[in-house]
Image: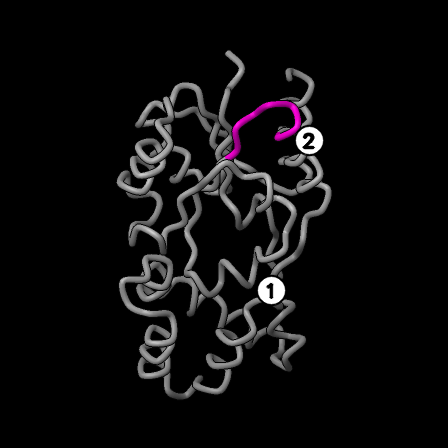
Amino acid sequence: MKPENIIFDVGGVLVGFRWHDMLTDYGMTDAQADVFGPKIFEDELWPELDRERIPYWDLVELYVKKYPEMEKDLRFFFTYTERMVVPRPQVWERVVRLHEAGFKLYLLSNYSSVMFEKHTGGAPFREVMDGGIVSYMVHEVKPEQNIYRHLFDKYSLDPAKCLFLDDREDNIQTGESLGMPGIVIRSEAHVCQVLDELLERA
């Protein structure tokens, strides 16, 4: 059955990331970046940034308190996070065509308000979305079920008539457990292929 609604994650689907290059551009060695990045992203504070029950800059201060020896690097990273984004104009062009073809388009993504605006502000896909739930809006994060239910309820979506595109298998699995089919996106080329197939069926 052709889906009526396409649900997009942002990071890893609509935009790419170059966090390692961002850090080496800043002056870190490859080895230093290899340590710094995972320490930040795998810390228990990271999902709390996306949940945003605590304001963004207050969370940054918690990072600084936890890793005082990295204060300068932390303040650089959280101040200039737009430098790690890789635009995907080929994907965005296809998203616009999906909108023109009559698909309903929504976002379902984990993001703090600060990073979301820095990473997506001015991107053409924002203009053609019919709606969306970003984690900071509801203080819930994927792969927890509540954020999915917020999306379904707010827009009266039948999960069975949706297709969810996300780069994390656990996020897709939660959607499937709620009746929403999904595809784990592996690369920019892969998402372009998936969108091309949808456009062929339009």
Question: Residue 67 is drawn in which quadrant?
Answer: bottom left
* Residue with the mark numbered 1: 84
**Amino acid on which the number 1 mark rests in the picture:** Met
Query: Number of labelled discs?
Result: 2
Q: Secondary structure at mark 1?
A: helix
Report the residue at 63% width, 29% height from top.
98
Answer with left or right where residue 156 lies relative to residue 20. Answer: left
Report the magenta residues as a range. Answer: 99-105
Q: Could you tell me residue 89's position as x and y percent?
A: 71, 46
Q: Could you tell me residue 157's position as x and y percent?
A: 38, 26
Q: Mark 1 or mark 2: which is in front?
A: 2
**Amino acid on which the number 2 mark rests in the picture:** Arg
Q: Is residue 101 magenta?
A: yes
Q: Residues within 10 Å of mark 1 (few under 14, many from 20)?
A: some
Colour mode? one colour
Report the residue at 37% width, 87% height from top.
68
Question: Residue 129 is drawn in which quadrant?
Answer: top right
Q: Residues within 10 Å of mark 2 (few under 14, many from 20)?
A: some
As displayed, is residue 127 above or below residue 160?
below
Report the residue at 33% width, 70% height from top.
55
Answer with left or right where residue 43 lies relative to residue 36. Answer: left
Question: Residue 194 is drawn in which quadrant?
Answer: top right
As displayed, is residue 63 above or below residue 124?
below
Q: Could you tell me residue 28's position as x and y percent?
A: 60, 80
Decide: marks 1, 2 in contact (CB < 8 A)? no
Work out whether residue 166 or residue 41 is closer to the camera in this orientation and state it.
166
Q: CA distance from mark 1 to mark 2?
A: 27 Å
Q: Could you tell me residue 148's position as x and y percent?
A: 33, 37
* Residue with the mark numbered 2: 97
Q: Is residue 34 magenta?
A: no
Q: Earlier in the sequence, mark 1 or mark 2?
A: 1
